[in-house]
Image (tube, rainbow, N blue to C red):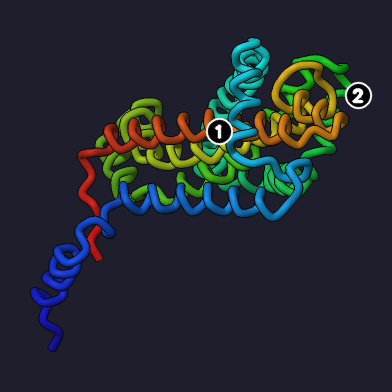
Amino acid sequence: MIDRDAQLEYPRRAEGRFPGLLTGGSLRLLSLLSLLGAWVVGAALLSPNVLPGPLETLAFCWRELRSGELTFHLAVTMRRVLIAFGLAMVLGTVLGALVGAFKPLDKLLGAWLVFGLTLPRIVLFVMAYLIFGLNDTAAVAALTLTVLPTVIVQLREGTKALDPKLLELSRAYRRPPLLVWRQVVFPQLLPFVVGTARGALSLAWKMVVLAELLGRTSGVGYQIAFYFQMFNMTGILAYGLAMMLVLAIIDVSFSALTERAFRWRRPLRF
């Protein structure tokens, strides 16, 4: 027989021996330092024209920030991302819930979902620019269509995972359909919506660079393309690093809000 109390006691003894190594903050700091160290080593081994070091990149970021260029292009990129992300989440949540709830609709839209998931994303941006012209409408439309199939699929699977007993209970009490969707279906879908939102925001934030690189004259993607034409790796890394930092801040804030919203849930113990 396995002593369960001994199993639970072992992690406590290990944590007492290595109190600084087992904390989440220490591990995150170690991960960040290892990434920074790899960058420093790579910059030392390669030419500065190939891989500039952290100090040179941060100095370039500071100059762009003081001139206002970095702030302007980041704001333009973020506006495009938020519009496309909002549209994709609203449409994807509604369509995903409907597709997951009604099998005929799932079969009807099955080919469309496969088409949207397998179509190369660069084709969407090129088609949008050819149809709507080189403007923000085309960029936002293509970006929305890029994220939408993923949201629909995630919410479809979340709808299929709903507790059928609660739905049967609602029907037994003859609750109106709209009331069932609002008080039974969507509360169960909320964790799936939150999880999908983080992935959709990350995908939109990455794909907007491609949209701006192909057909816009502003935004982070445009700046990366500009410095690529100038063979300026420092500028490319500076704007890429700025995007990473902004997305990291958004993701950490999103994660904190999620933990606060779902703090009532009991954590799993294995």
The quarter holding residue 207 reads top right
Q: Which residue is mark 2?
A: 130
Q: Residues within 10 Å of mark 2 (few under 14, many from 20)?
A: few
Residue 104 versus residue 112: which sits nearer the camera? 112
Horizontal side, residue 247 vs residue 109: left or right? left
Q: Which residue is mark 1?
A: 201
The correct choice, above or below, for 192 with respect to 3 in the image is above
The quarter holding residue 15 reads bottom left
Residue pictured at 77% horizontal, 28% vertical: 211
List x then y, in percent, for residue 121: 77, 40
List x then y, in percent, for residue 182: 36, 28
**Disc 2, SS:** helix
Q: Residue furthest right?
A: 130
Amino acid of disc 1: Leu
Residue pictured at 66% horizontal, 48% vertical: 43
Residue 166 versus residue 71: which sits nearer the camera? 71
Disc 2 to disc 1, C-alpha distance: 25 Å
The correct choice, above or below, for 74 with respect to 4 in the image is above
List x then y, in percent, for residue 247: 53, 32
Quadrant for the C terminus in the image: bottom left
Quadrant for the N terminus in the image: bottom left
Q: Which mark is residue 48?
A: none
The quarter holding residue 243 reads top right
Select label 2 or label 1 by which is in front. Answer: 1
Tell me which numbered mark, 2 or 1, is placed earlier along the sequence: 2
Q: Residue furthest left?
A: 5
Q: Residues within 10 Å of mark 1 (few under 14, many from 20)?
A: many
